[in-house]
Image (cartoon, rainbow, N blue to C red):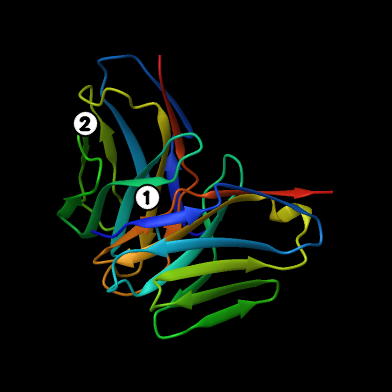
Amino acid sequence: DGGITQSPKYLFRKEGQNVTLSCEQNLNHDAMYWYRQDPGQGLRLIYYSQIVNDFQKGDIAEGYSVSREKKESFPLTVTSAQKNPTAFYLCASSPAEYGNNEQFFGPGTRLTVL
Amino acid sequence: GENVEQHPSTLSVQEGDSAVIKCTYSDSASNYFPWYKQELGKRPQLIIDIRSNVGEKKDQRIAVTLNKTAKHFSLHITETQPEDSAVYFCAAKSNYQLIWGAGTKLIIKP
């Protein structure tokens, strides 16, 4: 199913807690992305990474952090500074950001704040 | 920066009829325009895409047209079937990002 996985599928967080969402791909893709999707809404870019050890903020980066220590992995941390984190989080990867390439999506993580 | 508008937000068609979803974009430098289909609770999946040097592309019942002058592109689905019910997203590639439309919920009435 595209070789991109996310875990966990469902995640519950108490207010004030940091949580980390996992994203792994075995497609040898250079670029990886994190999106947030709210009910009935489109996709909003949180962070993206073109290459290992490098990443850029998207449109809604506040309250989130990422790392890209390995080509295969791009974890997203939702910090306590994110005031309304309940949403569906989608990770994607593509072969090369500079080209016109398809983005392949993981199955998503649904985060709920209790 | 790029802005993508998508219409309509909801589209209800009779099974067997055609459906058309339209998107406009603002950045004339955008050069790649994919369409994704997302079923409820699932990941978006690419159904068709078009590059800026092409005006039309067709894949069985699905086609996409691009008008670079007017900066709009459209998804056409013919002979709609129940499994076409989903949310459809358009996007435009600007710089290094895909800028997404807000989505169209397509309902196929039996």
- Does the image show residue B9? yes
**Residue B72: image location, x then y, percent:** 44, 69
Circle 2 SS class: loop
Label located before the other in sequence (2 or 1): 1
**Residue A64: image location, x then y, percent:** 23, 35
**Residue under the point 51% across and 37% down:** A40
Q: Residues within 10 Å of mark 1 (few under 14, many from 20)?
A: many
- In which image quadrant can residue A96 be found? bottom left
Q: Please say if A68 is above or below A26.
A: above
Q: Which residue is mark 2?
A: A63
Amino acid tagged 2: Gly
Q: Are marks 2 and 1 in contact (CB under 8 Å)?
A: no
**Residue B103: image location, x then y, percent:** 50, 49
Amino acid tagged 1: Glu
From mark 2 to mark 1, how far is it between C-alphas?
A: 22 Å
Q: Which residue is mark 1?
A: A24
- Foreground residue, A83 or B67? B67
Q: Residues within 10 Å of mark 2 (few under 14, many from 20)?
A: some
Q: Residue furthest left?
A: A53
